[in-house]
């Protein structure tokens, strides 16, 4: 295809990207004339966002899809954390820690080890974080530099219902026709 990178990502509902070169290789195999630096530039320009999304795994998505995907899965991710983490965390503590980390990140993106030192286990859905370049790129594959999604992407602007509808439409556009079970398995929504 000759689509721009964000539009291609919208068509395929993002790319799971646990290993940073994966998105580069996938886009190279899909887009005519794709050069390795194209994705790095898109991440730097913030037209493409890298974050933990569906199934609690790292994905690269178009900026336009980030908040709808994040909002759609937020409740399910929070339920999973409360059910799976041992000992069971207190929701008020998680909210307080999210506020503390948010304040800590106000001046600049932070490295993973800095976030852990301030807030302990930080990858929970009470504070949406995105991976900030150069981390998570071909050149620096380890995704260890983070910023809040609100600061990097902009503030959330979608209702939960609209977000779920958007996520389902993206899934069906990429993989449909599909059953409710297929969509639930991909997104971890019931």
Image: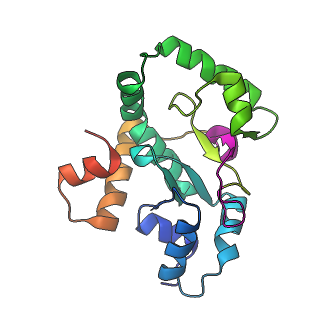
The reply to whether residue 183 is visible in this rendering is yes
**Quadrant housing residue 74:** top left
Residue 51 x, y percent position in the rendering: 56, 48
**Quadrant housing residue 5:** bottom right
Kindly identify the residue that appears in the image at 51 percent across and 69 percent down: 7
What is the image's colouring? rainbow
Q: Residue furthest front?
A: 86
| Above or below, comparing residue 45 to residue 110 in the picture | below
Residue 67 x, y percent position in the rendering: 51, 45
**Quadrant housing residue 188:** top left
Kindly identify the residue that appears in the image at 77 percent across and 31 percent down: 106
Q: Quadrant of the C terminus?
A: top left
| Above or below, comparing residue 91 to residue 171 in the picture | above
Viewer-proximal residue among 112 and 160:
112
Viewer-proximal residue among 88 and 15:
88
Kindly identify the residue that appears in the image at 43 percent across and 16 percent down: 87
Residue 91 x, y percent position in the rendering: 47, 15
Question: Would residue 181 be found to the left or right of residue 89 on screen?
Answer: left
Whether residue 72 is in magenta: the answer is: no
Q: Residue furthest right?
A: 107
Q: Which residues are magenta?
A: 136-154
Residue 33 x, y percent position in the rendering: 60, 87
Instruction: Give the tally of numbered discs.
Output: 0
Question: Would residue 134 be found to the left or right of residue 178 on screen?
Answer: right
The reply to whether residue 153 is visible in this rendering is no
Whether residue 148 is in magenta: the answer is: yes
């Amino acid at each position: 295809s000759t689509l721009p990178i964000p539009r291609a990502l919208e068509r395929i509902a993002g790319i799971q990207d646990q290993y940073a070169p994966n998105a580069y290789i996938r886009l190279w195999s899909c887009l005519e004339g794709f050069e390795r630096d194209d994705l790095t530039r898109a991440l730097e320009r913030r037209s493409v966002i890298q974050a933990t999304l569906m199934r609690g795994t790292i994905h690269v998505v178009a900026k336009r899809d980030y908040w709808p995907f994040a909002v759609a899965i937020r409740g399910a991710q929070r339920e999973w954390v409360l059910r799976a983490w041992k000992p069971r965390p207190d929701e008020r503590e998680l909210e307080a820690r999210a506020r503390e980390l948010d304040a800590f990140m106000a001046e600049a993106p932070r490295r993973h080890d800095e976030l852990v030192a301030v807030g302990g286990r930080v990858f929970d859905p009470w504070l949406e974080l995105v991976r900030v370049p150069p981390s998570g790129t071909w050149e620096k594959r380890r995704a260890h530099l983070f910023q809040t999604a609100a600061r990097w992407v902009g503030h959330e602007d979608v209702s939960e219902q609209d977000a779920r509808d958007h996520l389902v439409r993206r899934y069906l556009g990429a993989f449909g026709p599909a059953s409710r079970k297929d969509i639930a398995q991909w997104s971890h929504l019931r």
